Image (cartoon, helix red, strand yellow):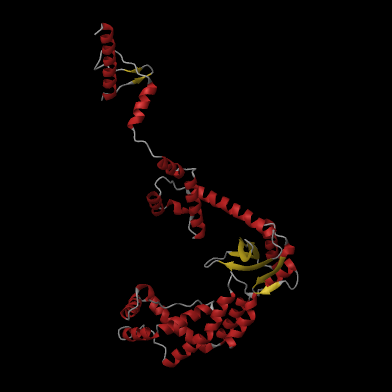
């Protein structure tokens, strides 16, 4: 064999061997701008192109699939999936009336880490900012829709928070919107404005004007306002729209009628007080409530079907109706428990007499149609003015 060929083969074998030794080396080779140096295995410096070394290192790593890359990319902040989850989170907080601090709770954080590990929950401050932006966007859409309407109706009332002196003026707008060619009744609560002055008719009228100005509502499009019979709000409607533009709330009128009749009947008030004392006893006695539950479970009722006694609220007759109705349902068990308790305790109230129980059943039968009429006339997703005559006639029939 010619010496030139031997020399060529020897040089190729030497290069291959050098390449194998370089690729299979387990040593940590210091990287410099001129290459890698293996000072322990060879006395000669070996120079390697940095780009070639990066290529070999990349081949050793596990390559992600295209689908995995797309899924991960869409889950990172700024991706489509991240935006969808964030918007769903904002919707949940608003729809379910959750506190803004819910994003700081361990439970929700654990849920999101399990459901979507790559998703990062926004901070409470950011959620607040996003809800404000969502409100402004929704408000702009509503204002555009209101400008396209020819006729609007309002309902308004003054609400006072329980155990508080703060009052708010609530204003709701009603209109018929054409959605895909089909008329749909819409009702939107525009605001609950805090009242900072005396609730005079002039002040309420000024509040309505401010709300209309904020939502760019033309006052000439307002057909009427439905309110209760309070003198201040009646005067406010007259100042705001003029005469004969107010519709009395029929549900409020029904409540006033029933409430007035019941308060003037002293025998009924005494009977209600007697039942209320029995309900209070059960509410304050853990043993009595447990026994009432046990008696129902023995009769075959499941956990979700077990009933409890309902306490009445002094200011609402329908809560008294609910108390009496539930009492008649559980009267047999209540009588049995009271009879047992009276043998060991002097503080046990007396059970109502049989004649009184019959009167309570008659009262429930009389008040039932008024309760149903009040609920029917208070609907928000259907027109209720056409129900006035049928609802008025139904109790008498």
| In-front residue for pair 259/395 | 395
Q: Nearer the viewer, residue 21 or 100?
A: 21
Q: Residue furthest front?
A: 1
How many numbered marks have been drawn onto this rendered protein structure?
0
Q: Position of 18 compared to 195: left or right?
A: left
The image position of residue 286, as x and y in percent, is 34, 75
Residue 7 as seen in the image, left or right of residue 361 = left
Q: Residue at x 50, y 50 (%)?
A: 127
Q: Is residue 376 left or right of residue 1?
A: right
Q: Residue, x 68% and y 74% (percent of image)?
A: 247
Quadrant where the C terminus lies? bottom right
Residue 61 drawn at (x, y percent): 34, 33
Locate residue 373, reporting x and y percent.
57, 79
121 to 159, vertically: above or below: above
Q: What residue sits 60% from the left and 52% below the top?
A: 137
Q: Which is more toward the observer, 326 or 278?
A: 326
Q: Is residue 169 visible?
A: no
Quadrant of residue 297 within the rendered picture: bottom left
Residue 392 lies, in percent from the top left, at 62, 83
Residue found at the very far top of the displayed protein = 3
* Quarter holding residue 389: bottom right
| The N terminus: image quadrant | top left
Visible in this render: residue 166?
yes
């Amino acid at each position: 064999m010619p010496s030139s060929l031997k020399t060529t083969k020897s040089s190729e074998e030497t290069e291959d061997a050098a390449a194998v030794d370089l690729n299979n080396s387990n040593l940590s080779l210091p990287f410099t701008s001129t290459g890698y140096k293996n000072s322990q295995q060879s006395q000669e410096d070996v120079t390697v192109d940095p780009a070639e070394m990066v290529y070999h290192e990349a081949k050793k790593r596990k390559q992600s699939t295209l689908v995995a890359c797309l899924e991960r990319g869409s889950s990172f902040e700024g991706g489509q999936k991240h935006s969808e989850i964030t918007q769903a989170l904002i919707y949940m907080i608003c729809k379910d009336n959750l506190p803004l601090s819910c994003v700081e709770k361990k439970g929700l954080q654990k849920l999101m880490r399990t459901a979507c590990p790559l998703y990062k929950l926004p901070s409470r401050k950011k959620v607040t900012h996003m809800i404000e932006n969502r409100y402004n966007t929704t408000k702009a859409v509503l204002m555009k829709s209101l400008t396209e309407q020819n006729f609007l109706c309002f309902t308004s009332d003054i609400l006072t928070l329980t155990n508080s002196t703060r009052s708010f003026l609530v204003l709701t707008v009603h209109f018929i919107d054409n959605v895909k060619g089909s008329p749909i009744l819409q009702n939107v609560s525009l605001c609950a404005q805090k009242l900072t002055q005396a609730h005079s008719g002039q002040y309420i009228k000024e509040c309505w004007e401010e709300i209309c100005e904020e939502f760019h509502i033309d006052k000439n499009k307002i057909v009427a306002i439905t309110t209760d019979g309070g003198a201040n709000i009646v005067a406010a409607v007259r100042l705001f729209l003029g005469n004969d533009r107010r519709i009395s709330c029929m549900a409020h009128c029904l409540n006033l009628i029933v409430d007035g009749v019941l308060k003037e009947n002293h025998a009924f008030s005494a009977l209600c007080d007697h039942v209320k004392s029995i309900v209070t006893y059960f509410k304050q006695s853990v043993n009595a409530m447990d026994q009432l539950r046990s008696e129902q479970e023995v009769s075959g009722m499941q956990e979700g079907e077990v009933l409890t006694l309902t306490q009445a609220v002094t200011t609402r007759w329908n809560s008294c109706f609910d108390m009496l109705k539930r009492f008649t349902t559980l009267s047999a068990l209540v009588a049995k428990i009271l009879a047992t308790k009276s043998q060991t305790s002097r503080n046990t109230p007396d059970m109502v007499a049989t004649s009184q129980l019959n009167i309570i059943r008659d009262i429930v039968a009389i008040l039932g149609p008024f309760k149903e009429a009040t609920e029917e006339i208070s609907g928000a997703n259907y027109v209720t003015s056409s129900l006035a005559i049928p609802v008025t006639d139904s109790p008498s029939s």
